[in-house]
Image (cartoon, rainbow, N blue to C red):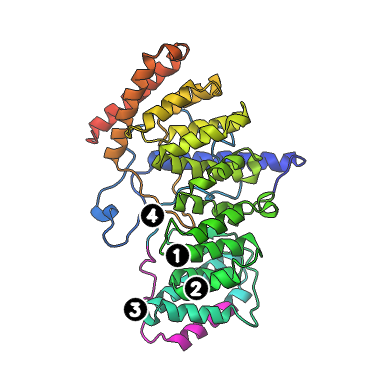
């Protein structure tokens, strides 16, 4: 991890962050469908409708700014960012493979363990990790989640020996981990897939009973999330997420697993942890916590404008720090302009004397904020807005911006407001031409 005493590494990290942000922006502006949509039965996303970006983006539309606004540090491209919807394992899953029983399941697990132990490179290990997930899915389908969980718990019991995979902690789009750092984490991911009470009991008694590593703790949280039926009101899970995010030895040098675990705050919409997320906004950009926390707050504010009010209340002590100011502006810019309760939130923000001219100008130039990076997360899901929804939001935003033009208190921002009106007019006209309005 880069420090203030390592300027060369910082330069490389920031260059990589800028490159990744550019790629993310291109994905957002060009994306007309999603390979990460939920393919579970009954999902509205399977209707054939393509939730494309509804608008043509003007060439002068402001691009992402410096770290602190929401750019990932090098190597953390998917930390804390919105996932696409999580599909169930696809055609490669041998769910109907004949003859799989508990004994054969264990034998296959041991075979994979041996191959993972001797695998020569990361590519082989990634392939074997996927094969493990497919095997677990097939076993759940044929012998049941409880039976699979019991076998995995036995493997994690007495005499367990770990294997270091030398791979990152990275969720996948299918609800399983794409890569994990070791054999124990892989077995725990298999336990999470079972959603069995057996798995939940093991996580409470043998994973979350002590703080071994952030990776272990994150997998324990995932098990509880799945075995609770993804219950946002699970008090035990909320308490363990809080415990993780308030552990100084973990948060002072945050790992990828800790940053990925910020997603549990989104999944549970845990407003009690908004102050913690705000505190992370003020950390050093290269730690990854400002980016991860900013994305968490943006997603929560989009669903609930009162989160933006919390952020405003909690950021008074930050003064005019430019990175935190941009993050705050972005969070407020995420509120849904079609919701009546969003309007007073925006008005309060613009009238706040603690908002600098630079921050206010940035907010006007980027409102409403619809740009999103769609990547997999450990717990939460997100369905992209349809073209019609985005068009309606832009139309509502235009009415709000028109009210700014008539506000004497914003007279000094006339140039910024006129530019915003022109931008929204162009976007809405494009939506009309495309049939979204």
The residue to which callout 1 is attached is 226
Q: Is residue 374 magenta?
A: no
The residue to which callout 3 is attached is 96
The residue to which callout 2 is attached is 199
- Compute the Cα span from label 4 to label 1: 16 Å
The residue to which callout 4 is attached is 85
Name which of mark 4 and mark 3 comes first in the sequence: 4
Closest to the observer: 210 or 73? 210
- Compute the Cα span from label 3 to label 2: 24 Å
Q: Which residues are magenta?
A: 88-114
Nearer to us: label 4 or label 3:
4
Disc 3 element: loop
Nearer to us: label 4 or label 2:
2
* Image quadrant in which you'd find residue 56: top left
Disc 4 + disc 1, Cβ < 8 Å: no
> Could you tell me which residue is drawn at 57 percent across and 53 percent down?
242
- Compute the Cα span from label 4 to label 3: 25 Å
Disc 2 + disc 1, Cβ < 8 Å: yes
């Amino acid at each position: 991890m880069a420090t203030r005493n390592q300027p060369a590494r910082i330069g490389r990290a920031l260059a990589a962050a800028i490159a990744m942000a550019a790629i993310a922006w291109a994905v957002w502006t060009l994306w007309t469908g999603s390979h990460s949509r939920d393919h579970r039965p009954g999902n509205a996303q399977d209707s054939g409708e393509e939730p494309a970006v509804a608008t043509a983006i003007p060439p002068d539309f402001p691009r992402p700014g410096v770290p602190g606004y929401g750019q990932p540090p090098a190597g953390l491209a998917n930390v804390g960012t919105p996932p696409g919807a999580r599909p169930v394992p696809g055609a490669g899953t041998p769910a109907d493979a004949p003859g799989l029983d508990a004994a054969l399941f264990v034998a296959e697990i041991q075979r994979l363990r041996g191959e993972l132990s001797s695998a020569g490179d990361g590519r082989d290990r990634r392939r074997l990790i996927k094969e493990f997930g497919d095997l677990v899915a097939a076993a759940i389908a044929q012998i049941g989640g409880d039976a699979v969980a019991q076998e995995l718990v036995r493997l994690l019991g007495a005499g367990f020996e770990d294997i270091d995979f030398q791979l990152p902690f990275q969720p996948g789009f299918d609800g399983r981990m794409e890569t994990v750092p070791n054999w124990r984490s892989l077995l725990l991911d298999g336990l999470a897939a079972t959603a069995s009470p057996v798995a939940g009991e093991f996580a409470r008694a043998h994973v979350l009973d002590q703080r071994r590593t952030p990776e272990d703790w994150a997998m324990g949280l995932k098990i509880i999330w799945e075995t609770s039926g993804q219950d946002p009101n699970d008090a035990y899970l909320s308490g363990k997420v809080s415990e993780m995010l308030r552990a100084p030895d973990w948060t002072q040098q945050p790992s990828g697993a800790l940053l990925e675990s910020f997603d549990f705050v989104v999944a549970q919409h845990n407003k009690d942890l908004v102050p913690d997320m705000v505190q992370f906004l003020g950390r050093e950009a290269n730690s990854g916590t400002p980016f991860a926390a900013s994305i968490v707050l943006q997603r929560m504010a989009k669903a609930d404008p009162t989160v933006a009010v919390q952020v405003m209340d909690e950021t008074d002590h930050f003064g005019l720090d430019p990175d935190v100011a941009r993050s705050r502006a972005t969070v407020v810019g995420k509120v849904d302009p079609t919701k009546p309760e969003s309007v007073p939130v925006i008005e309060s923000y613009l009238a706040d004397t603690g908002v600098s001219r630079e921050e206010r100008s940035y907010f006007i130039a980027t409102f409403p904020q619809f740009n999103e990076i769609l990547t997999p997360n450990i717990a939460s899901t997100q369905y992209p807005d349809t073209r019609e929804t985005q068009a309606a939001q832009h139309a509502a935003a235009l009415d709000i911006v028109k009210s700014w033009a008539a506000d004497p208190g914003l007279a000094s921002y006339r140039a910024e407001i006129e530019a915003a009106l022109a931008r929204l007019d162009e976007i809405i006209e494009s939506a009309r031409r495309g049939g979204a309005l």
